[in-house]
Amino acid sequence: MPQPRNAAVLTAALRSWATTTRDPDGHDVARVEFRQAPDWAPVGKTPLTGQQVDRLLTILRADLIPPRRNTPTQAAAAVDQIIAEWRAEGRTRIRPTDLIGQLPRIGQTRAWLAQHLTHLVDSGYLHETRRPGTYRL
């Protein structure tokens, strides 16, 4: 788990070392200036790709914005959507571990997910197989 001050350190570094310039086409480009110890003198600049900017923003958001829990109704809708996507991909079986990787999207705890899977089996939406912990869609 990242330390709480990582975002503050990254923000200070980006404020000091990042610049925005225009490319020849007139688009804004974020550039990072690299500095080298011991005197932290600039040694070069490089543009950041859109993917790199998105990753940095994701890190900052995860560090600064606490995760929001979905209501049980919202979480159930998210599970339904995930299962529908998997069905569309042609999957015929799922395991609870498949859904554990989706917990940030679901917005609930593992305990809630286990209880909800039981509900999905009891309601006939999922079907138990001969293999424990594997369900047929």
Image (cartoon, helix red, strand yellow):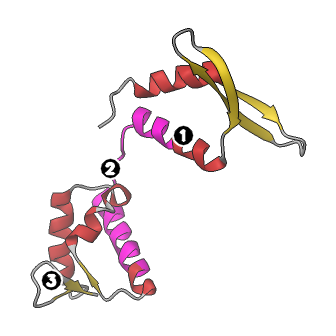
The residue labelled by disc 2 is 69
Of circles 1 and 3, which is in front? 1
Indicate whether 60 appears above or below 35.
below
How many neighbours does mark 1 have within 10 angstroms: few (below 14), some (14-19), or many (20 or more)?
few
Q: Which residue is mark 3?
A: 122
Give, as a three-letter code, the residue at label 1.
Leu
User: In the figure, residue 112 lies in which quadrant?
Assistant: bottom left
Q: Nearer the viewer, residue 126 or 47?
A: 47
Q: Secondary structure at mark 3?
A: helix
Q: Residue furthest top?
A: 39
Q: Position of residue 116 (x, y in %)?
A: 20, 70
Judged from the image, the secondary structure of the residue bearing numbered disc 1 is helix
Residue 65 as seen in the image, left or right of residue 113: right
Q: How many marks?
A: 3
What is the C-alpha distance between the residues marked 2 and 3?
A: 25 Å
Query: Residue 34 at x, y = what percent?
Result: 62, 25
- Residue carrying label 1: 57
- Determine whether label 2 and label 3 are within 8 Å by CB: no
Question: Which span of residues is magenta-colored?
Answer: 58-85
Contact between labelled residues 3 and 1, with CB atoms less than 8 Å apart: no
